[in-house]
Amino acid sequence: MIPAIKTTGLTKTYGKKRALDDVNLVVPEGSIFGFLGPNGAGKTTTLRILTGLARPTSGSVQIRGHDVAAASNTVRADVGFLPDVPGFYEWMTAEELLHFSGGLFGIGRPVLDERVAMLLDLAGLGAVKTRIGGYSRGMKQRLGVAQALVNAPKLLMLDEPTSALDPMGRKDVLDMLTSLRGRTTVFFSTHILADVERVCDTVAILDQGRIVAHAPIDELKGRYGVQKVVVEVTGGGDELAEEIGRQSWATAVARGSDGAIEITVADMSAAQREIPAMVAARNTGISRMEAGEMGLEEVFVELVGGEPR
Amino acid sequence: MNGFTVFAGKEAREILRTWRIWVLPGILLFFALTGPVVARFTPQIVGALAGDQLSGLKLPTPTYLDAYTQWIKNLSQIALFALIIIYGSIISAETKSGTAVLVLTKPVSRTAFVVAKAAVHSVFLGVLVLTATLLTWGLTAAVFGKAPGSALWSSTLVWLVFGVLFLALMTLLSVLIGSTAGAAGAGLGAYALVSIAAIWKPLGTYSPAALATEPASLAAGKDAAVLWPVLTSLLLAVAFVALAAQMFRRKDL
């Protein structure tokens, strides 16, 4: 199957600064692909190149099998794009903007009218008749998503689509992206890990212009993620941590800021069996015990070393 | 409809629904309506302002040609300066506000984006200038009793070519220079150069530089050879827009 997006050796330099360094991406058709990275990692630069707004210094970009530079209008006909800070003609109303956007794709009037009405409802702007100049940032963001969908795109690219939204707006956008699964390839950049974990099936992590991880999300967690147990006891925490550290199933033991014992385990069932026994033998009690896989947040921190949101 | 016509339609509606419908039309309307009256009463105005100081000076009786000359002078200076300043952001305003990204990530080529803007605003300028000229022509006839049209229309049409040339130049400068003030400054500098170049006879005869001075001669009822300057100006305007499109295609947005 032809991938929705394929970049090969994508590099972009601004003077001496290397914004993107040999980025190789393959976004499978039909996937919801999270493009994750801290601020300044090069996500927006990548999206600008993918949409033909900027040229790579070297490397190539193929969208649905077409070279972006060579077949620009053909490529753009099937793509919807939401920039990180969408710009609008502020003298237009939302309805006018969607009609204008649809017109640029050559969509005829009866179909366009129907689609515009549907998208205005989706964006929660059906009843808003005022000019865009008076909209809040959240309203503009929702309108941005709506205009990106006006051509029923086969590939939807969004740059930080949820960063300006309140929790309800975020949920609406993420639900909408989830609803597109299987019908449209969704490629979105974000630094919000929870959004990626919630809707994406595949993820790439970009750091300082380089791809540091690129895999289906479960595989990534399996590859980098390890199993962890967190225990809080009513007393004797230091001694218990020392004893746990000597066990063969415990590969690492650390103390959390709240005094909890964080144990990286090689054998989860042994840990779950033996930790309560060790606590009981010390005649103390367990106030909390949690076991689970390392989340994407920990994977991100491990790979990027930054502060996730 | 294709992307070009839809975008050109947007550009036309933007003129009608933003400040653009007030500024340049307001300036032209003001000069169209005041020019003939000011020309007609110039001796009285000068007399009233100067008092006894110019009592020995006899000003000639104004004619409709004075109104025409006044009109072309206003077009060649204030209207042209306003045009240069207003169109200093014809492209850069869209790249700065992010609206260019909205349009250019859809099936609209960068060439279509630039050409549509230059074409729509040239038509807008033409409609404005012709409408204002019609007004000033009628008012001149009312004020002076007669107003033969040839001197007014020939000078205005020749100036219009000069205006379109500067609109095309501003399109190019707005692609090259992101700052509105920077592009406008370069445009005003180009006007100064063209005015100086007109002094050198070969340029003053064949090049667009002639259009800085010749419309005034035509408006005064004199003969002027403007065929070559008009042709070279139109060719240069096309070249400016083509170069603007070429440069815009290479630009990272």
Image (cartoon, coloured by chain):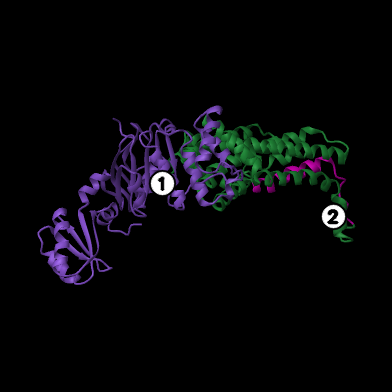
Chain colours: A purple, B green
Q: Quadrant of the C terminus of chain A?
A: bottom left
Crowding at mark 1 (Cα within 10 Å: few <14, some 14-19, many 20+): many
Q: Chain of mark 2?
A: B
Helix, strand or loop for disc 2: helix
Q: Chain of mark 1?
A: A
Tell whether label 2 touches label 1 (CB within 8 Å).
Answer: no
x and y percentages locating residue B200 in the rendered image: 61, 43
Relative to A284, does residue B177 appear above or below in the rendering? above
Q: Residue at x 86, y 39 (%)?
A: B142
Q: Are marks 1 and 2 on the same chain?
A: no
x and y percentages locating residue B216 in the rendered image: 72, 41
* Residue on which disc 2 sits: B46
Segment tinted magenta in the rendering: B56-82
- Mark 1 vs mark 2, CA separation in Å: 65 Å
Q: Nearer the viewer, residue B215 or A202?
A: A202
Q: Amino acid at mark 2?
A: Val
Q: Residue at x 46, y 53 (%)?
A: A166
- Is residue A138 something that shows in the picture? yes
* Residue on which disc 1 sits: A159
Q: Give the left or right position of residue A262, taking residue B171 as reference.
A: left
Relative to A105, does residue B101 appear above or below in the rendering? below
Assess whether residue A139 is covered by the magenta stretch: no
x and y percentages locating residue B199 in the rendered image: 64, 45
Helix, strand or loop for disc 1: strand
